[in-house]
Amino acid sequence: MRKNIVAGNWKMNLNREEGIKLVEEVISLVSSDNNVEVVFSPSFLYLHKVNKMCANDNLLQTASQNISHNDSGAFTGEVSAQMVNSLNVKYTILGHSERREYFNETNIELKQKVDLSLKNNLEIIFCCGESLNQRESGVHFDWIKQQLTESVFHLTEKEFEKVVIAYEPIWAIGTGVTASSDQAEEIHQFVRNVIAEKYNENIAENTSILYGGSCNPTNAKELFSKKNIDGGLIGGASLNAENFTRIIKSF
């Protein structure tokens, strides 16, 4: 049975003290009967500390925001999957729209990162999504299917069980255009169908698919009520303990 997951991607925000305070506040606000997996994705610098803060609860996990597509070597400034795994971190986020846009990450490069993640026992939150131009041109379904096909569909069924999908409607992030819950559900259903076509219905039904399009305390309940939306990959709203907790409690 697939899990409900709310993951907070801090991006390049918060210093160490601010990050520790945020995690402490979220932990104190999340009720003891919480059944949602909560994932914190801080800077590499704070991963070890945040992971230790989450160690006593299996529903509190951490994720790196990226890993290198190289295993090791003379790559100044890079962080490998092996390094992240050595901190006992559960997840890494791969394919985020900002990484694709600003760092020119390709589907082929992401395939390498996927393989290195699994080789080093990291589970994956894999991001996919389309731009406004792609949606208006009517190629968004093909685009998303291509992202999945070229980066994760080479995996075996057993390997794919370690993958969570996060749908990012890039056209609805910071553009002033809002994606409705029905539009989000349409893509989530499509992604689940594509997974079923590639693998089988059981794998598809057990894959968690998160919504990554400006989810906030106001719209989370409606989004999470949809059949194929299993949680959220949260950006700005995850930087505020009260807002993040309200999203977690929206199931």
Image (cartoon, helix red, strand yellow):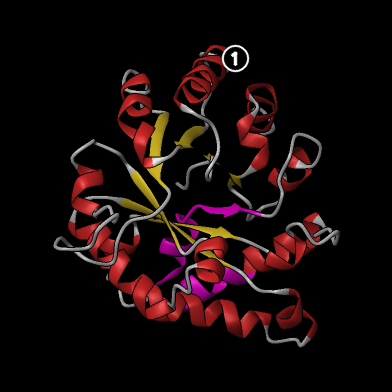
Which residue in the rendered view is the most extreme toward the front?
76
Q: Is residue 55 left or right of residue 104?
A: left
The secondary structure that most of the magenta stretch takes on is helix
User: Which is nearer the eye, 148 or 235?
Assistant: 235
Q: Quadrant of residue 66?
A: bottom left
Q: Is residue 8 visible?
A: yes
87 sits to left or right of 161: left
Question: Against 77, is 90 above or below?
Answer: above
Q: In the visual, does 80 lie left or right of 171?
A: left
- Residue 173: give x, y in percent of width and height: 73, 58
Residue at left offset 62%, top offset 23%: 241
Residue 178 figure quarter: bottom right
What residue sits right under mark 1 in the picture? 29
Q: Is residue 63 left or right of residue 25?
A: left
Which residue range is magenta in the image? Answer: 190-212
Q: Where does the image place residue 80, in percent across and percent down from the top left?
A: 24, 54
Q: Going 45% across and 46% down the picture, which residue do you hit? A: 1
Residue 202 on the magenta span: yes
